[in-house]
Image (spheres, rainbow, N blue to C red):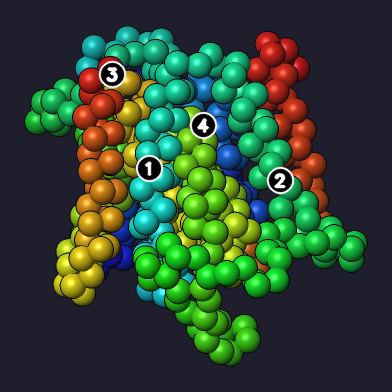
Amino acid sequence: MVSIVLRTGVIVSAGVIVVGLILLAFNGLAGMTGGIATAMNFPHTFGAVLSGVVKLDPVSVITLGLLLMIITPVTRVAVSIIAFAMERDWRYVGITTVVLIVLLVSFALGKAGS
Amino acid sequence: MTQILAQFLIILVVAFVAGTIGSLLGLGGGIIVIPALTLFLHIDFRLAAGASIVSIIATSSGSAATYVKDRLSNIRVGMFLEILTSVGAVCGAFLAGLVTGSALYVVFALVLMYSLYPMGKKIALELGWRVQPFGRHKADNAAPDAFAAKLGFSSSYYDPAVKREISYDLHHVPAGATIMYFAGLASGLLGIGSGVFKVVALDTAMGMPMKASTATSNFMIGVTAAASAGIYFLRGDIDPLIAAPVALGVLGGSMIGTRLLARLAGVSIRIIFFIVLAIISIQMILKGFGVSL
C-alpha cells in the first residue's frame, strides 16, 4: 500500500510537470518579455498556484506538479498511520502521527515565515 | 521563449548527468546536482537547494517503493527516527534563510568532503589497502538498548548473497537519534538527502546491518526532504523553471544510474569521480570565500 502511494505520487507529479511543459512550449509565458527566466515572478503560495492552474498558466501547472511531488511523502506518512492502525500497533500510530504533525506544522510555519 | 526552453534543456541535461553520477557512486543526486547548478550554471545557492530538495523527494519516493517491498528497510526504526530528521530539517530550512550564501557554500563543501570519506575507503579496500571498512561497528557486545526493545526495533531480512535470514537488534538509540537530528538539519540547510549521515546513525551508531541501513535511510530521505521543501516553496526558493528540469533530470538520471551500476562502476571510474568531487568541494569552499576560478 505504501509503495503504491509512492509510485503513484511520483508518476502523477512527473505527469503534471510534463503537461505544464507542453503548455509552456505551446503558449509561452504570459507577460514574459525576454530576460532570464529565473528572475521572474513565479507563484509561491498555494492560492496563487491554484488560481494559475485554473487559467492553465504553464508555470502554475509545473508548480502544481512540484507541489504534488513534495506532498507524496506526506501522503505516505498518512497512509502509514492507517497501516499501523490496521495492525493495531497503537504506539506506532502515535509515532507516525507525530511525524505527520511535524510535516504539517512545517507548511504552516513556512507560510508564517514568508 | 526559445531562451526559456534552451535554459530548461540545459538544466535538464546537467541534472540528468548529475543524477546518473550520483546513483552510480551511491552518493545521491543532491550532493552532485547542487555544485553543478551553482558552479557551472551560476544559479543562486538557495534556488539550487530548493530544486535539489524536490529532486531528492522524487528519487527517494521512486526507489523507496521497491525497498519497502523487499522488506530490507526497517519501517518502524525509520518512522521513529523521522521525528528527529523532520524536526532537524525544519530547523535547517529556517537556518538556510538566515545565514549568508557564503556560509552555505562552505558547509556544503565540508559535507561533500565527509560524504567522499566512505567512498574513498571503499576504493582503498578494493585496491587492497589495509583500511577498516566504513561504518563497520565494533563487536556487538553492547547491551541491548531499552528504547530499542520498547519500540520493537529488532528485525530481520533475507539476504540473497548469503542465502539466509539476517536478524539484528539495535542499541545506542539516543546517540543514533541525535545524529539523525543533525542529518535532518544538514538536509534542510543544504537541500541534500543526507544519506551518508543517516547511514552513520543507523549502521555505525545503532548497529543496523549495512544493507538494511541503506534501505532504511533511503526510505527516510523523502520524508525528511518534504519537511523542508514546504518552507523552501513558501519562501519562494523553488523556482519552477529550475526545479522542474532538475527533478525530472535527476529522477531519470538516477534510474539509468541504477541500471548502469553493475557494468560501469568499476574502481577506476570511481577514482576519477572521487578526484573530481574532491576538486569540486575545494571550489565550493573558494566560492564561499568569494574566490572564483
Tell which tag, 2 or 1, sits nearer the viewer. 1
Residue at the disc numbered 4: B190
The extreme right residue here reads B129
Describe the element under mark 4 as helix, strand or loop: helix
Amino acid type at circle 4 is: Leu
Where, quadrant-wise, is the C terminus of chain B in this rendering? top right
Q: Residue at x 53, y 70 (%)?
A: B144
Describe the element under mark 3 as helix, strand or loop: helix
Give the percent coordinates (x, y) of residue A53: 15, 31
Question: Chain under label 4?
Answer: B
Give the percent coordinates (x, y) of residue A72: 27, 50
Give the percent coordinates (x, y) of residue B241: 37, 28
Give the percent coordinates (x, y) of residue B160: 56, 84
Circle number at residue B116? 2
Tell which tag, 2 or 3, sits nearer the viewer. 3
Same chain for the residues at labels 2 and 4, yes or no?
yes
> Badge 3: few (under 14), some or many (20 or more) residues near its Cα, within 10 Å?
few
- As measured in the structure, the alpha-carbon distance from the residue carrying label 4 to the one carrying label 3 is 18 Å
> Badge 2: few (under 14), some or many (20 or more) residues near its Cα, within 10 Å?
many
Amino acid type at circle 3 is: Gly
Q: Residue at x 52, y 86 (%)?
A: B165
